[in-house]
Image: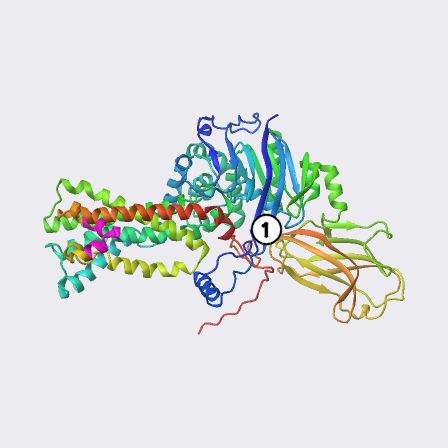
Amino acid sequence: MASAIAAEELSKRYRIGELQSAYGTLRDSLVSAARRALRREHRPRVAEVWALRDVSFVVPEGEVLGIIGRNGAGKSTLLKILTRITTPTSGRATIRGRVGSLLEVGTGFHPELTGRENIFLNGSVLGMRRREIQQKFAEIVEFSGVEKFIDTPVKRYSSGMSVRLAFAVAAHLEPEILLVDEVLAVGDAEFQRRCLGRMEDLSRSGRTVLFVSHNMQAVTQLCDRVLWLDGGRVVGDGPSSELVAAYLQSGHGSSSSRVWPDLETAPGDELVRLVHARVVQDGKEAAAVDVRRPVGIEIGFHVLHRDGPPVFPKLKVVDERGDVAFNAMDTSPRWHEPATPGTYVSTAWIPGNLLNEGFVTVHVAVCSLGLTKLVHHAGMHDALSFHVQDPGEGDSARGIFAGQWQGVVRPLLEWTTEER
Amino acid sequence: MTDTELDARDLAPVADPSLSAAAPSVDRVTVIRPAPRWPHLDLRELWHYRELLVTLAWRDIAVRYKQTSIGVAWAILQPLLMMVVFTLIFGKFGNFPSKGLQYQIFTYSALLPWVYFASSVNLASASLVANRGLVTKVYFPRVLMPLAGVVVPLVDFVFAFGVLVALWAWYHRWPDATIVVAPLFLAMALVTALGVGLFLAAVNVRYRDVAYTIPFLMQLWMFLSGVFYAFSALPEWAQLVLAVNPMTTVIDGFQWGTLGTHPPELDKAMISVGATATVFVVGLWYFRRSEPRFADTI
């Protein structure tokens, strides 16, 4: 069978800083150039990172390939190169067929234009011909369920409605190759479920699918094969069940729940061992949580003996870009004395309306106080992860606004206004 | 830039809307390669994306006329108010040379191509940054954005042209057959604006402070373009120097077409045409060279 994608030694180099905000001001550049000239300084060496390094793989037509790896492993860069948004520094890739992606949902939507106008705009931006859009127009409108508002400007839509409309357009693109980046897929659990459903439909009809995800269950279920990236390199390529197992064992994989059944091999030292950790909301374990309600981080640990320093549970919450949202530890008096040996289950409650939407990783630990820093007795990086989602009902910090919302946190503040 | 063999896809049958069908025949092959050192303009690819250009331009026009409450009126008011002010200041008090015409009609026929040019440069140079979401999420030849930026103000131009028709009627100065040259000079303004816009759009991605200098640059440029004085009344040496600014020839030529004044002199026109070509080639070259990094830096 012919290959849909053949990548040969794809590499992408970024200068440090380019990933964040690369643009500066001409003034700054001129000033620093003048300063260098005057003092005969050398141009500062620019640090470089390889976001991708010699990545080669072949995807046969009709295969569903999962791409896994930690945040920053190069997954998104790979998708950006395959969708031609950015060019590789070296290497090449040959792609047979039209590429569509569910990371472009809603791209090019303009709030002032009506639903009808936006279907044409969005479809055209995604590479559909006008005739093609006309043919599928009725189908798209029906799928979106916004018939009544099709001639209303999109700015009057609820965020749920505009996501549905955007998804309806993307879903009717019918590319030969579909790229899905779960982390970037906006929307609620229902929307993500539909993305996955659409993916299954497409793969069943013989399309090639590339699926980037942190959800190992979905990867095992949907993918035939998995490509495991780490530090921009391919570290594994093989059947999904095998690779997912290896990935989870390596400790890189994160999930909403973790159990260490064997006290001997569980993370920890001679004083404390981790037993389990999980994310809970509304009394249930949750891989996706509602931004408006509290989220519990449950840490189970076993204290082995009395002769150690007082220990307490601690966690660190990191957002999908790797920025630390916050650290938290239990300061209650119960941990002021060394604990009696036994198993403890502590839950830290992250208030509702605090985290921003997106993919969140949690580092869990059991620590004691050191002189200048905390001593970690038992702990695990990227132990837990979950998606924070906004159902878009208008009562969260973003109100009815559906666009991009920056920030590590997204608190719902109280506002007071006086008229003077 | 990547090379794409696109023509095959146009011949492909439209994909069957029902998903149960077998995988469609795949006959579009894309080869992704590192950006070449010497960029070239892929005209075949541009042709392939022609519908998107129309869509982008249509979007900007639709939004523009929906957002501003006075809509079409703004397209007319802007040059009209400038004409009134120029007529009062330069025409009445300054007694500026106006090629022996009523000052109103003289300056309005200069303002028409000028206002088109200035808004084209503004729109084109802001086009990439304003469409950040598109640049970081989907691929298409980025040249389309500045290109849409110089197409959109043509609509304003058409409305504003109506005022000139009214002025023709008022002053009984109907143009003769030379009117056919007017679109050529407008095209020259378009190519110049595109060249400048391509360059500034690419610079804007890198250096955001450049955007603030553009209004000032355009103001200065207007003073050097013969909008409120007759270019042909300047001393010969000044005309030769200023001819490097293509807008002098554009305005001179546009007035030749619409008002039947003297045609631009050949030597100055050649200098201007050369300048337009240079600006366009340099702008396009710089844009294409910066293009691979747009998504990473914007």
Please give the name of the residue rendered at 42% of the width and 55% of the height, measured from the top-left corner.
B204
Q: Secondary structure at mark 1?
A: loop
Q: Chain of mark 1?
A: A
Whether residue B243 is in magenta: the answer is yes
Query: Hey, what amino acid is under mark 1?
Result: Pro
Q: Can you say whether A319 is above or below A187 in the image?
A: below
Pointer 1 residue: A391
Give residue A18's quadrant in the image.
bottom right
Picture residue at 23% right of the left edge, 42% below the top: B184
Q: Is residue A10 left or right of residue A285?
A: left
**Percent x, y for residue A156?**
46, 51
Indicate the position of residue A384 as horizontal and vertical percent values: 72, 52
Q: Is residue A208 left or right of residue B149?
A: right
Q: Which residues are magenta?
A: B238-254
- Residue A97: x and y in percent read 53, 31
Does the magenta-highlighted stretch encompass residue A382?
A: no
Provide residue A350's location: percent of width, then percent of height. 68, 60
Dominant secondary structure of the residues highlighted in magenta in the image: helix
